[in-house]
Amino acid sequence: MGNRIITISREFGSGGRTIGKLAAEKLGIPCYDQEIIAKIAEESGLAEEYIKERGEYMPSSSWIANALSARSIGGLANEDQLWSSQCKVIMDLAQKGPCVIVGRCADHILRDDHELLTVFIHAPKEKRAERIVRVYGESDVSIEKRLKDKDKRRKAYYQLYTDTEWGVANNYDVCLDSASIGIEKCADLLVELYKGMK
């Protein structure tokens, strides 16, 4: 088996990114999140803005529509090129040593070669709405619509590329409600679970 790695999937606004960074800090290991974007851009030649928007999200909330859209004669789309580069970058980062990787289907990409603690962070919609206003600020789009849209497109992306349902408890080692447990306590729990991995 390869390195011990925590992968974090999360609902938009649940604080998964923050929890991942906190847990990594407490464990003294790197956390890869936004840093992955620049590496994928270098690997793929695609623009960072495109990767930021499409590295976890499909253009449509329907995975079937996404599977059929924007294909070339050879059957490939920019999203497929992005997926291939993303897989390579994530596998390369995982080979470097123990780490935390936030999002980008890392749980699926690394499932066969590393010792994983796969985590899903969620929270009630109203708590996530409060948090995204606090963290990201107001927007022209309604908060409810932002939450629904981001999660639907993230779910469609995950299903298309992993053939697994995103956010279903059986697909993860641990599911944590960040609103009831708290961000800091979630990070502490991940640290304890990681240290207890055999």
Image (cartoon, grey):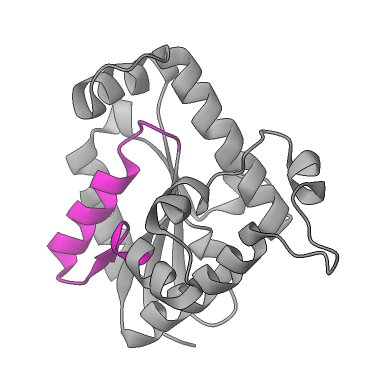
Residue 93 lies, in percent from the top left, at: 37, 78
Q: Which residues are magenta?
A: 11-36
Q: In the picture provided, is 138 more to the left or to the right than 46?
A: left
Magenta-drawn stretch contains 124 = no
Position of residue 148 relative to residue 172, above or below, is above
Front-most of residues 17 and 150 = 150
Quadrant in which residue 166 is drawn? top right
Residue 46 lies, in percent from the top left, at: 48, 64
Residue at point 51%, 78% (across, down): 88
Front-most of residues 125 and 196 = 125
Residue 91 lies, in percent from the top left, at: 47, 79
Front-most of residues 136 and 11 = 136
Position of residue 46 relative to residue 146, above or below, is below
Residue at point 81%, 42% (across, down): 64
Residue at point 69%, 49% (across, down): 159
Identity of the residue furthest to the right in this view: 73
Residue 186 lies, in percent from the top left, at: 27, 44
Q: In the picture provided, is 18 more to the left or to the right than 119?
A: left
Q: In the picture provided, is 176 more to the left or to the right than 137?
A: right
Position of residue 165 relative to residue 47, above or below, is above
Tally the numbered discs: 0
Residue at point 60%, 78% (across, down): 112
